[in-house]
Image (tube, rainbow, N blue to C red):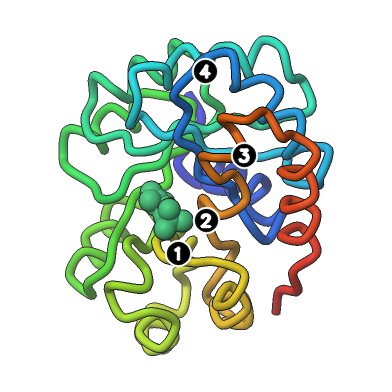
Amino acid sequence: MTTIEQKTENLLGVLEGQPVIPVLKISRVADAVPLARALARGGLPAVEITLRTPAALEAIEAVAAEVPEAIVGAGTILNGAQFAEAAAAKARFIVSPGSTAELLEAASSSDIPLLPGAITPGEIMAAQAAGYSVLKFFPAEQAGGAAFLKSLASPFAGVKFCPTGGIGPANAGDYLSLGNVVCVGGSWVAPDDLIAAGRWDEIAELARGAAGMARR
Ligand code: 3PG
């Protein structure tokens, strides 16, 4: 069994690889493979496919099986059952907007790293007590944005965040300039209309722009 420290290292290896993790909502399974290929071509191999659509698990499975250059994660994992389903679909990392005892229990008996969400000092302290030092910060803009995150750096010096929610090309730089931000997540690189129309080259272009964003 992989230790939580090792899982955190593995997760950091993924998150440090690119400034932006695409957050994907996939309605048609058939879109998953060309979408993941386009994002990888643009420089964003790691993607988070959210369990917000009935197609999500099959989409994760398809990307894991058919796009070797991609690193597919599962997002919006809310409970132990979904953790198990995402693991069975071969997700390489698991993302949750928050954390519960049940979710942490599922994660502790798996080798797949979990990126749990936390916003408040109390939530961050609970996550730290459970061994987590890399956290999702969602919904970032609505919760207080880059200014809020910046003020967490001093009390929580050892914690790194992946903020998501309301982040786009105009404000991603505000987050990426912070020392406690490892990367940001966002759906802007894979807009619904471009996916629906199969405009993969335009998505690869959006990915290229995001992949080139500077980090601190
Ligand atoms: C998430 O789950 O990370 C967010 O829904 C992504 O937010 P965005 O659509 O505002 O980028």
Question: Circle 3 is placed at which residue position?
Answer: 194
Give whichever of 67, 42 is nearer the camera.
42
Question: Circle 2 is placed at which residue position?
Answer: 185
- Which of label 1 and label 3 is nearer to you? 3
Q: Work out whether mark 1 precedes mark 3 in sequence or the reverse, and give the earlier one.
A: 1
Percent x, y for residue 51?
A: 35, 29
Cβ(mark 2) to ligand 1 < 8 Å?
yes
Question: Circle 1 is placed at which residue position?
Answer: 163
Determine the image quadrant of residue 35.
Answer: top right
Give whichever of 188, 77 is nearer the camera.
188
Question: Circle 4 is placed at which residue position?
Answer: 59
Disc 1 marks which amino acid? Pro
Give whichever of 34, 1 is nearer the camera.
34
- Which class describes the residues within 10 Å of circle 2: few (<14), some (14-19), or many (20+)? many
Residue 135, visible in the rendered structure: no
Determine whether the residue tagged by mark 4 lies in a helix, strand or loop: helix
Tell whether label 4 touches label 1 (CB within 8 Å).
no
Q: Work out whether mark 3 precedes mark 4 in sequence or the reverse, and give the earlier one.
A: 4
Q: Is residue 179 above or below residue 207?
A: below
Disc 3 marks which amino acid? Leu
Determine whether the residue tagged by mark 3 lies in a helix, strand or loop: helix
Tell whether label 2 touches label 3 (CB within 8 Å).
no
Disc 2 marks which amino acid? Gly
Tell whether label 1 touches label 2 (CB within 8 Å).
yes
Q: Work out whether mark 1 precedes mark 4 in sequence or the reverse, and give the earlier one.
A: 4
> In percent of the image, x 59 and y 65: which residue is there?
182
- Which class describes the residues within 10 Å of circle 4: few (<14), some (14-19), or many (20+)? many
